[in-house]
Image (cartoon, rainbow, N blue to C red):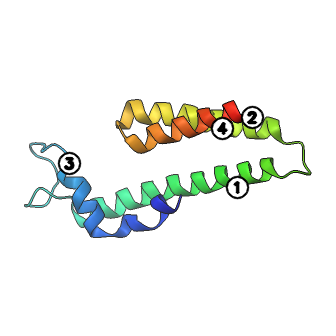
Amino acid sequence: MAGELFPWSSPALLQKLSRSLPQVVGADLSPEGKWTEHQQTLVASIVRNAGIYNAILAGGLIWAAWPETPNRDVARVLLAGAAVAGVFGTLTLKSPFTALQAVLGIVGLALI
């Protein structure tokens, strides 16, 4: 969550990511082949949105782990959702971060 909410407005991180993107003919990139300021703002908004979802997921898992409440079913649903989202993200984004999300969801399910 913290990795998605806070550093994304940093031009250095966004510029590094834009270097890994393939050059597209006619793309709306700056002359150096980097993302424009408008694109950086849009990407930062999208990634922050994902960070909020992860915060909600983390809050639900912390609540489900509270010893006085029988919330294992809630934890299973949230962990299964994290695993599915991680697999989907890995297939579509080709990101090691989403693969880690899938692994953590699967490990969490196995531990419950």
Q: Which residue is drawn at the image coordinates 73% and 50% (left, top)?
A: 60
Indicate the secondary structure of the residue bearing disc 4: helix
The Cα–Cα distance between marks 3 and 1, rounded to whole angstroms, is 33 Å
Location of residue 15 with respect to 97 vertically, above or below: below
Q: Which residue is drawn at the image coordinates 48% and 31% (left, top)?
A: 87
Q: Which residue is drawn at the image coordinates 45% and 67% (left, top)?
A: 6
Estimate the x, y position of residue 86 in percent, counting from the top left. Answer: 50, 36
Q: Is disc 1 surrounded by few (<14), some (14 to 19) or many (20+) residues within 10 Å? A: few
Amino acid of disc 4: Gly
Location of residue 27 with respect to 40 vertically, above or below: above
Estimate the x, y position of residue 8 in percent, counting from the top left. Answer: 38, 64
N-term-proximal mark, 2 vs 1: 1
In this figure, which residue is indicated by the disc labeled 4?
108
Query: Is 41 on the left-hand or right-hand side of 81?
Result: left
In this figure, which residue is indicated by the disc labeled 1?
59
The Cα–Cα distance between marks 4 and 3, rounded to whole angstroms, is 32 Å
Q: Are marks 2 and 4 in contact (CB under 8 Å)?
A: yes
The Cα–Cα distance between marks 3 and 2, rounded to whole angstroms, is 38 Å
Q: Is disc 4 surrounded by few (<14), some (14 to 19) or many (20+) residues within 10 Å? A: some
**Quarter of the image where one finds residue 99:** top left
Amino acid of disc 2: Ile
Of the residues tagged 2 and 1, which is closer to the observer? 2
Circle number at residue 20: 3
48 and 3: which is toward the camera: 3
N-term-proximal mark, 3 vs 1: 3
The Cα–Cα distance between marks 2 and 4, rounded to whole angstroms, is 6 Å
The Cα–Cα distance between marks 2 and 1, rounded to whole angstroms, is 17 Å
Circle number at residue 112: 2
Q: Is disc 3 surrounded by few (<14), some (14 to 19) or many (20+) residues within 10 Å? A: few
Query: Is 18 on the left-hand or right-hand side of 89?
Result: left
Q: Which residue is drawn at the image coordinates 65% and 49% (left, top)?
A: 57
The quarter of the picture where the N terminus appears is bottom right
